[in-house]
Amino acid sequence: MASSKTLSHGDYLMGWVCALPLEMAAASVMLDEAHEPLSQSPNDSNTYTLGRIGNHNIVIACLPIGVYGVISATASVVQMRFTFPQIQSALMVGIGGGAPTSYFDIRLGDVVVSTPTGTSGGVIQYDYGKTTAGGDFERVGILDKPPILFLTAVAQLQAKYMVGKGQISQIVSKTLEENPSMKAMFSCPGERHDFLYHGDYDHPALSTTCGLCDSRRIVKRDPRREGELLRVHYGLIASGNKVIKHGQTRDRLAKELGILCFEMEAAGLMDQIPCLVIRGISDYSDSHKNKDWQGYAALTAAAYAKELLSKITGRSSTQAETTRGMQSDCMCESELGS
């Protein structure tokens, strides 16, 4: 990463929001250049990491430790815009719980990207709605879809991955090589540590590992070929204020709504700022949850975000900075000539 320099608040047009410290760690090592901290609005309690990825100046924020969910995410991005009023869009990047189906072979370490479907903008708040007279739960409201600038870049990346030219694995390898202290927490645990149990099989009570779990209840899946170990999936991400740790609930909602991934913060951003959600899969949203894959999943999501930003050719932060500089120079020349 290049040495630090100081910019102005108006030079930052893009936010990057994380929920966990390990997600922020993964985000910070994606920066091509670090920037010095800036003063903050008295209405802003966030703590930021500032820097540049490609030609985009980025404001990275992490939610308060232990304070997660939709409301916390909403507060974070609202406060961010008090200090950085020129921010136009944001990425929500981190880990999530996968919802594998017969149509989507989602595995630990894979990446899920929120993209619009026929009835949704890409993120659905699955626990927001009302209970009707018959006792059924009716979801209400539709969240905004990601900005076209992001969606066109996602389409280009999707085409690249179809022909085997994606860069996530290379970015992850380079990052760990340049930051060896991260290897213990952020390296890939490997396919032999990736177990998907049938949805109706719960983790044994009081057991802290899956050592006592019945191996006969593991879903049989073909090994992935070398070079295809990590996949990117595109579709609907479910967001809500509770953690899903129940295989049958996961399967029911995945079938009912077409969900690929569960998480807890994205719904708080979608109507506040144009936003794309990127999640690395760290578990299967069931009672067999563990933390072994969290670091690697956070890193794969951050690597995808970095690759995505390299494809965005719209108005960039550095272009805005250059334009302001040219305008300032013109003003000075005019004043000198008057």
Image (cartoon, rainbow, N blue to C red):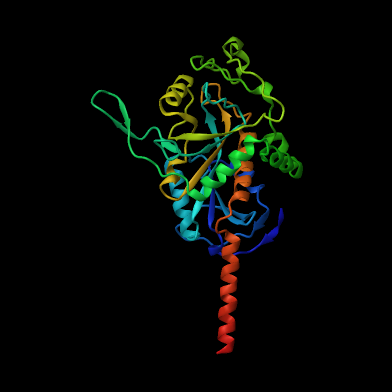
Taking the view exactly as shown, the residue that stands out farthest to the left is: 133
Q: Position of residue 282 (x, y in %)?
A: 58, 30
Q: Position of residue 115 (x, y in %)?
A: 49, 39
Give above or below for 13 relative to 336: above
Judge whether residue 44 can be spotted in this image.
Answer: no
Identified at 66% across, 36% down, the residue is 163
Identified at 47% across, 34% down, the residue is 236
Q: Position of residue 205 (x, y in %)?
A: 52, 16
Q: Position of residue 268 (x, y in %)?
A: 43, 43
Judge whether residue 238 can be spotted in this image.
Answer: yes
Identified at 48% across, 41% down, the residue is 67
Locate the C terminus by quadrant: bottom right
How many numbered dots are placed on residues in this image?
Answer: 0
Identified at 42% across, 49% down, the residue is 272
Give above or below for 62 relative to 315: above
Pick the front one: 185 or 265:
265
Pick the front one: 189 or 165:
165
